[in-house]
Amino acid sequence: MALLATESLTKTYGGRVTALADLTVSVEPGIIGLVGANGAGKSTLIKILLGLLPPTSGRVSVLGLDPTTDPAAVRARVGYMPEHDALPPDLSAAELVTHLGRISGLPRTVARERASEALRHVGLHEERHRAVGGYSTGMKQRVKLAQALVHDPDLLLLDEPTNGLDPAGRDAMLTLIHRIGTEFGISVLVCSHLLGEVERICDTLVAIDGGRLLRADRVSAMTSATDVLAVEVSEGTDDLAIRLAALDLPVAREGRLLLVPLADEATYDLILGAVAELDLPLHRLDQRRHRVAELFATREPSHV
Amino acid sequence: MSELTGVIHDIGYQRYTGPRLGRRHVFGALYLHGVRTAFGLGRSAKAKIFPWLVVAIVLVVAAGLTAVRAQFGEVVMTYAQFADAMSWLVIFFVAVAAPELVSRDLRSGVLPLYFSRPLPRGDYALAKLGALATALWLLLGAPQLVMFLGAAFTTGDGMSGVWHELLDLLPGLLYAALWAVVFASIGLLIASLTGKRAFAAGGIVAIFLMTTPVVGVLSIMPSPTINELAFLASPSTLVGAVGTWALGDLLVPEGQGGGMPIGDFGPVYAAAVVLLVAGCVTLLLLRYRKVAAR
């Protein structure tokens, strides 16, 4: 069963602003990165998934449930971490998360236990009885994550969880999200406008732009066969290209570089051999891993 | 547990398979939380000062009235009159408690955390409204209970005296409930419009303050009908007028005078109260329909 599925999902505000346009996507459980620039429609999609906004047209299902007709059932099994500040400053983290646990339907004592467990898992334990107003941004983000976890959801929706964090805080947050997705057995949808950030922890990437789907695929499928050797010679680039093509290597030109897909270790030897035979001055030969960003970048124009 | 072996294990993440309570329990949890919040319980010491100051004042007044009655046998105020006499304190209590209940949530942005849970947005508003009305009713009802207990223990007529007191107390509590519902629905609606607590408090006091002169002006107009309908203009006088109509001499004991000259318009006032409360609740629900979608 698909974790999330949308079919021709469209949302327009007041008939003028189009937030989502004919979005059809289906993803399997795991850690999903939802990437797109600010205003791409990520938050709108999350609100529709939570049943807080009705779609203008199209269908949507979350965990096999329809949030437009049964929002309470969806929300009981989903945890949501909003992007913006969402914490009353005068309550302690423990009180707030306990209270929200009860609003999710946990009995009183269970809510208290699970609140302190959730806060422990996000790395807040000693501090949890202090008022949230005195917390650092990183600690506040952790409290927001803990309140999304307290009722043991099957799916977490995290809207820009690394917002406002310093690099170390970003790494810690991403590691935590990865742990939740792998060790805790909870599927996670991470929204971000920073592709480089989420591609490190996700199994699946969904990229949207202007409310349209750019691409949705498993990260493994996107990055497989994308390891490339970049060859640069000071002169005779064309000769080398012809020579390599003769060796049945699919060569591509990129400016002064020749790009050769790395099949196995023998590819190195073939290239080095060819360079030596032509007696060309080798400037550089290195392996580079295609960043997912480039995959999206090359496809973007054809879709928008 | 791990105490047996003396080793502390990191037990890792535990899934929860126990019961998840339904809508009624969730509503109850939010409602109780709201009643506690109105009295500053579970909040900082600063948040407790004002509510408990008001509670102390009404209880001291009630104790004083009880003492006067026990000593001199003179009934200074009936139960129902007590609510009228305390109305200004109630207004200030609403002006502090209503923003505490809803403006604070608007301001801190915590509402998305509520509305992403299986809590219908209407339930949020109604639980808060119920909590505020309950707090107000307790504020007016508890002193009446003090007065009742004082009277019951000092009555000279045995059980029949106690029974007679009880029959006086119950309408008083009902009248307190009317105050509570009217003030809570107006106060909460105003507070739900802004995240700034100072603005909300000012707005609430203003609504009650500004409408009182209108009543004054209308009641000296040269038309008896307008004079008798003048009390519709302000929530406080509206409640008082309904009390005058429904409770009669319990609110305005014979020989004391000072009742509201509402003529034969009692039912009009009753209908106006119902419409006012229904209108406020409807607007409150509409307000949260809009807020939740943000």
Image (cartoon, coloured by chain):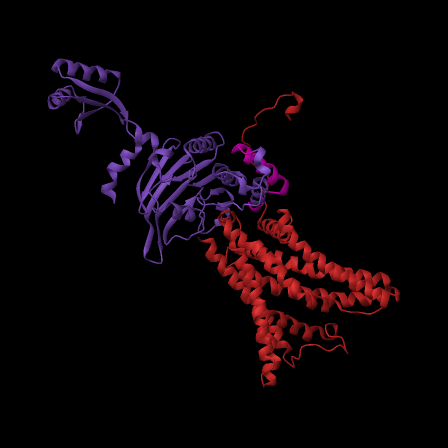
Chain colours: A purple, B red
Q: Which residues are magenta?
A: A102-124
Asked whether the viewer can see residue A114, the reply is no
**Count of number-bearing discs:** 0
Q: Position of residue A165 (x, y in %)?
A: 43, 37
Asked whether the viewer can see residue A247, the reply is yes
Give A237 or A78, whichever is nearer the viewer. A237
Q: Main secondary structure of the magenta part?
A: helix
Residue B67 left/right relative to A138: right
Q: Does A51 sit above or below residue A130?
A: below
Q: Does B46 sit above or below residue B258?
A: above
Residue B149 left/right relative to B179: right
Q: Position of residue B90 (x, y in %)?
A: 65, 62
Give the residue drawn at x 59%, y 60%.
Answer: B95
Residue B147 left/right relative to A278: right
Give the residue drawn at x 37%, y 54%.
Answer: A56
Give B130 or A284, whichever is nearer the viewer. A284
Q: Position of residue B68 (x, y in %)?
A: 82, 65
Q: Is residue B168 magenta?
A: no
Q: Does A29 sit above or below residue B117?
A: above
